[in-house]
């Protein structure tokens, strides 16, 4: 006789087997916020518990129990317990409108998967991992966002995934390969091949200066921490022996080279038509004329690129970039105030692009001089020509840090990076460095920002303003703290600043008032509650394929960082007086709730509805937001198993000299891949004659080139065990 097992009972047993026994009855709570991807074992780990007092969630409440536990999801057992600590003596956090408690579980370091449990209230957080490489996959998908943003490039299913495979966009008649000047649409003589580059944000336009900034950020991220970037991100260039971040940077750099005129100037932008998917766009592509901002910003990208690509053995490409950098610098130096405002009625460019790529009409603006000073540092490192270095050394006091009584602020982040690069360079004036260090310390430690706000923000990630693109500012602040921690600017506080830098990552990953990871479609990659929507032409609100994760067939592609909470968000002004043009348009104003009168850190909603609700001011992505996040996140990633580089690295210059060429009389610096007890540096003529030999025992190694006539030389470095350097050096 057969015994039949009831299917319903079988299903219940299966479900029971998926969860530890003591997890049943625990309610998942948005009031216990954590980094949904997880934490590195040695990291400071703090869950933030919120009791909302202001905002649309104020009807939710919690009185945290005295016992909080860290539960191992596999065993269901508590591995740590403690009591949450009230933040700010119970006062409401001003940015979020929440009363807050912090639960520190830093002592939990064993790799595994866990969640936080409020034992008294029987509430639990989302799950999270603890492991050394917890951010490596997140970093991979954040960088892959740029692959999805490539213009004029087919996204094959094997790389893009079935949901986001698409043909090459904007390569049809009168599009990027036959792009024409914006005010001469019918003049074939103005045609240029301007294919490539990245869609800048949620629109498809391509801006030269902004692209150059993104390329620069990629190169700096690699330069800061090269070992964490692998060659296996599943982009078409993966497996070529070059870290994929440099392949992606090259994609942007190649487009900048196409934008350069023969005189060295660079065209300002290319305006592209819209459709979803991108390959469906058929409208004409138009470009704007050359301007100074595009040219000098590209000069710094070209110069830094020449340095970085030379170090990895791409000598010919580095030489091309060097030539482009020198030509761009020369043109910008001779033409310091060539202005072009796109999308402007005054010059007939309305509709050319979306955002205005120009930075201002004043050729003495400190922003314009910041670009030139940064390009000057890179060019000095590349060529050894003191003329380039002199720009920064002449102008360094003409920025807010010195002009505004030792001032630092979130809108001058790139100037802070400029100062730190000079401060930590082997070259430069000791007097200037001491002056910079003194002002940075004073500015950073003022009570109203940066170090003065450590421990005074409920979600442990203070920014002064939740403005448009607040997630970029979170990343910028985090990077600033990281630089302070790792560049010996204030050694006594290095550990505090390092932990603080990582807290900004935790905010973006879910330790925020919305308990949301501000990245799209990442639930397959570790997040429990990531963004389901983002404002983007491809992932349009009316698309049945890409609008919303869990509703549309695919939702948006993974890894896009949204702009984040924006305290200035509002719907279109026409909604205030039923003036949107028709009853149907007016009805759209009330089609769904939007963030109104929320605390600044809650001025966000996971939606992508266009006009008149104007979701773009909070949910639109930007390559600028993305690279800021990537640069910060990469600081806490770890080298992949092996190298992640599929081909041999015999051509990779892990030790090198700079600047190269070097001007006679300037010092030639030697950078090695690791420290040695002693290193012999030898200089030979190209005929093999030994001209110089010295034994160095310090980490910073440099030699005076005054004794060398102009010409080409070979510099070699030897330790007791191996040859660590062999490089040709030109003396000018």
Image: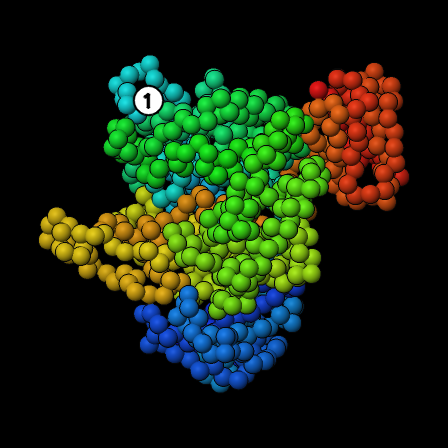
Residue at image location 34% in from the left, 32% down from the top: 341
Classify residue 610 as left or right of residue 702: left
- Residue shown at 23% from the left, 52% from the top: 572
Where's the C terminus, which quadrant?
top right
Q: Nearer the viewer, residue 63 or 401?
A: 401
Crowd band around label 1 with a 10 angstrom C-alpha radius: few (<14), some (14–19), many (20+): many
Q: Quadrant of the N terminus?
A: bottom left
654 on left or right of 183: right
Quickly name the residue at label 1.
180
Q: Is residue 563 at all visible to an observer of this figure?
A: no
Q: How many marks?
A: 1
In the displayed orientation, state which residue is furthest to the top: 189
Q: Image height check: is 311 above or below 732?
A: below
- The answer to whether residue 405 of the structure is visible from this angle is yes
Horizontal side of residue 396 vs 465, given as left or right: right
**Which quarter of the picture shows residue 286?**
top left
Image point (37%, 75%), residue name: 53
Residue 180 position in % (x across, y down): 33, 22
Depth check: give the residue in front, 514 or 550: 514
Q: Secondary structure at mark 1?
A: strand
Q: Position of residue 97 (x, y in %)?
A: 39, 70
- Nearer-the-camera pick, 341 or 321: 341
Residue at (76% x, 39% y) in the render:
672
Residue 679: percent from left, percent from top: 85, 38
């Amino acid at each position: 006789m057969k015994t039949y097992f009831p299917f319903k009972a079988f299903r219940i047993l299966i479900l029971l087997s998926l969860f530890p026994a003591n997890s049943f009855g625990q309610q998942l709570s948005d009031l216990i916020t954590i980094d949904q991807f997880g934490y590195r074992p040695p990291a400071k780990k703090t869950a933030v518990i919120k009791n909302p007092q202001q905002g649309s969630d104020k009807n939710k409440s919690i009185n945290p129990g005295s016992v909080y536990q860290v539960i191992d999801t596999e065993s269901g057992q508590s591995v740590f317990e403690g009591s949450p600590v009230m933040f700010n003596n119970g006062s409401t956090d001003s940015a979020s409108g929440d009363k807050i408690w912090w639960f520190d579980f830093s002592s939990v370091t064993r790799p595994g998967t866990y969640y936080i449990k409020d034992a008294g209230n029987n509430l639990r957080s989302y799950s999270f991992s603890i492991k050394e490489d917890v951010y490596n996959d997140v970093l991979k998908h954040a960088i892959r966002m740029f692959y999805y943003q490539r213009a004029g490039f087919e996204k094959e299913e094997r790389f893009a995934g079935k949901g986001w495979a698409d043909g090459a966009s904007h390569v049809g008649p009168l599009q990027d390969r036959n792009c024409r000047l914006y005010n001469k649409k019918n003049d074939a003589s103005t045609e240029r091949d301007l294919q490539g580059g990245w869609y800048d944000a949620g629109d498809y336009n391509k801006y030269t200066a902004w692209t150059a900034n993104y390329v620069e950020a990629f190169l700096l991220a690699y330069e800061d921490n090269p070992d964490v970037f692998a060659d296996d991100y599943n982009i078409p260039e993966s497996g070529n022996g070059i870290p994929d971040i440099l392949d992606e940077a090259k994609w942007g750099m190649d487009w900048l080279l196409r934008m350069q005129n023969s005189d060295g100037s660079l065209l300002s932008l290319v305006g592209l038509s819209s459709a979803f998917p991108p390959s469906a766009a058929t409208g004409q592509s138009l470009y704007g004329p050359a301007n100074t901002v595009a040219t000098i910003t590209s000069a710094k990208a070209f110069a830094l690129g020449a340095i970085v690509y030379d170090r990895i053995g791409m000598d010919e490409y580095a030489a091309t970039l060097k030539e482009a950098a020198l030509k761009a610098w020369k043109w910008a130096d001779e033409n310091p105030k060539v202005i072009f405002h796109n999308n402007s009625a005054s010059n007939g460019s309305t509709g050319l692009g979306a955002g205005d790529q120009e930075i201002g009409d004043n050729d003495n603006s400190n922003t314009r001089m910041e670009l030139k000073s940064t390009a000057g540092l890179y060019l000095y490192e590349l060529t050894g020509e003191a003329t380039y270095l002199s720009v920064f050394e002449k102008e360094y006091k003409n920025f807010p840090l010195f002009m505004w009584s030792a001032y630092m602020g979130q809108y001058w982040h790139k100037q802070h990076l400029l100062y730190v690069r000079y401060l930590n360079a082997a070259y430069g004036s000791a007097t200037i460095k001491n002056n910079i260090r003194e002002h940075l310390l004073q500015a950073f430690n003022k009570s109203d920002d940066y170090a003065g706000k450590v421990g005074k923000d409920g979600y442990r990630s203070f920014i002064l303003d939740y403005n448009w693109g607040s997630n970029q500012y979170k990343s910028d602040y985090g990077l600033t703290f990281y630089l302070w921690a790792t560049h010996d600017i204030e050694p006594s506080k290095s550990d505090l600043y390092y932990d603080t830098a990582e807290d900004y990552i935790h905010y973006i990953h879910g330790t925020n008032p919305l308990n949301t990871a501000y990245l799209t479609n990442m639930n397959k990659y570790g997040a429990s509650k990531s963004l389901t929507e983002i404002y983007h032409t491809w992932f349009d609100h009316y698309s049945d394929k890409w609008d919303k994760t869990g509703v549309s067939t695919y939702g948006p592609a993974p890894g896009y960082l949204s702009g984040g909470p924006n305290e200035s968000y509002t719907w279109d002004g026409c909604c205030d007086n039923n003036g949107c043009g028709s009853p149907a348009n007016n009805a759209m104003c009330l089609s769904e709730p939007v963030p109104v009168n929320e605390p600044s850190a809650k001025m966000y909603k996971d939606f992508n509805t266009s006009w008149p609700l104007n979701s773009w001011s909070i949910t639109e992505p930007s390559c600028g937001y993305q690279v800021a996040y990537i640069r910060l996140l990469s600081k806490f990633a770890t080298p992949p198993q092996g190298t992640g580089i599929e081909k041999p690295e015999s051509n990779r210059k892990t030790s090198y000299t700079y600047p190269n060429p070097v001007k006679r009389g300037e010092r030639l610096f030697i950078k090695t891949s690791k420290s040695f007890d002693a290193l012999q540096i030898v200089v030979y003529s190209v005929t093999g004659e030994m001209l110089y030999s010295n034994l160095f025992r310090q980490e910073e190694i440099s030699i005076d080139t005054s004794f060398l006539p102009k010409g080409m030389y070979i510099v070699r470095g030897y330790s007791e065990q191996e040859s660590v350097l062999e490089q040709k050096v030109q003396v000018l």
